[in-house]
Image (cartoon, rainbow, N blue to C red):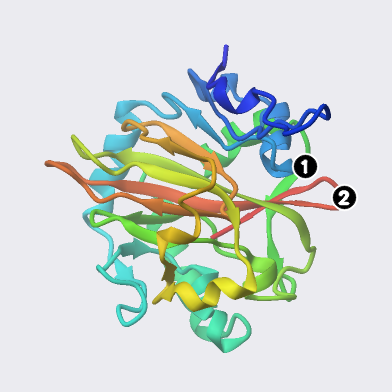
């Protein structure tokens, strides 16, 4: 059964009309306990995050990590994203400034998918993740496409030094990229490894406003923008997964102590027809 933080279910209205914040973290004990209702409420904005414990076994995580040591890792543009974040696979974000997904994106996508496809004892860990989410969604789920081509999904990255507070929304950052536009976007992270301390994700109940650009800091934003808003903090363990709405501002805290913070990540979006699409 999911456990829910009760504080944001309290009535916070200043008059007789009730208003509920509805920005909790719900925790389930395994991927098999994840429900469609939770995914729908997350997409609708009435849930802060879903923390899935034991999404994958220690053996599955260890196998992927060992395989990862033998594949080439790139990184985000270090003039924009610092400290360096090693990663396998392209993010659509890498190509936003080109106003489209050009040849470099598709070449990187093809090569990275081939490297990742055998990391799980000859199988692709992306397939494991998608299958377990599809079982909960209980509806159509497919790769997002751009110009008729399936987009890359399943980036693996190491965020040892944390990440600045930022937001992600493909509809605003690359309008028209998806062949089938989505009406909601959520982000999935499966943690293959976590440090002994630190590495938590804080998610704020605050979305980007045009005036926020005055507080821009490289790819991120000053946290003062969201400090007065409700927020949740999730610190997963190795093998856990966390799903949240990346259109909300969120920040990753740096490691505190030994260990690596490595996750397989992708976005998901619900189309008007009810298909759950995924991409990175």
Q: Secondary structure at mark 2?
A: loop
Answer above or below: position of 102 versus 179: below
Q: Which residue sits at x=56%, y=43%?
A: 244
Answer above or below: position of 53 versus 189: above
Q: How many marks?
A: 2
Q: Check whether the beta carbons of the residues at disc 1 and disc 2 lie within 8 A of each other.
A: yes
Answer above or below: position of 235 versus 254: above
- Residue density around tag 1, few if under 14, some if 14–19, many if 20 or more, within 10 Å: few
Q: Which residue sits at x=18%, y=34%?
A: 196
Residue 33 appears in which quarter of the rendering? top right
Side of 216 where 63 appears, left or right? left
Q: Which residue is mark 2?
A: 273
Image quarter of the N terminus: top right
Residue 251 % position (x, y): 41, 53
Residue 37 appears in which quarter of the rendering? top right
Residue 42 % position (x, y): 66, 38
- Residue density around tag 2, few if under 14, some if 14–19, many if 20 or more, within 10 Å: few
Q: Secondary structure at mark 1?
A: loop
The label on residue 140 is: 1
Near-viewer residue (172 or 131)? 172
Near-viewer residue (42 or 207)? 207
Side of 251 where 1 appears, left or right? right
């Amino acid at each position: 059964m999911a456990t829910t933080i009760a504080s944001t279910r309290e009535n916070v209205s200043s008059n007789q009309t009730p208003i509920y914040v509805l920005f909790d973290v719900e925790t389930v004990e395994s991927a098999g306990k994840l429900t469609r209702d939770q995914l729908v409420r997350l997409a609708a904005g009435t849930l802060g995050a879903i923390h899935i414990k034991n999404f994958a076994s220690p053996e599955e995580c260890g196998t992927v990590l060992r395989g990862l040591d033998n594949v080439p890792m790139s990184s985000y543009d270090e003039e924009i994203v610092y400290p360096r974040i090693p990663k396998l696979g392209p993010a659509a974000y890498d190509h936003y400034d080109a106003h489209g997904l050009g040849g470099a994106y598709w070449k990187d996508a093809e090569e990275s998918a081939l490297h990742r496809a055998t990391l799980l004892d000859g199988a692709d860990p992306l397939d494991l993740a998608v299958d377990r989410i599809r079982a909960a969604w209980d509806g159509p789920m497919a790769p997002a496409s751009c110009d008729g081509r399936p987009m890359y999904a399943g980036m693996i990255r190491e965020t040892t030094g944390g990440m600045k507070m930022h937001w992600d929304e493909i509809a605003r950052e690359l309008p028209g990229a998806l062949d089938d536009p989505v009406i909601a976007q959520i982000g999935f992270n499966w943690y293959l490894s976590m440090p002994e301390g630190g590495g938590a994700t804080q998610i704020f109940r605050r979305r980007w406003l045009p005036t926020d650009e005055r507080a821009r800091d490289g790819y991120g934003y000053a946290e003062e923008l969201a400090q007065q808003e409700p927020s949740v903090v999730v610190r997963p363990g190795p093998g856990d997964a966390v799903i949240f709405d990346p259109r909300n501002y969120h920040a990753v805290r740096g490691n505190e102590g030994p260990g690596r913070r490595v996750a397989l990540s992708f976005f998901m979006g619900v189309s008007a027809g009810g298909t759950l699409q995924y991409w990175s």
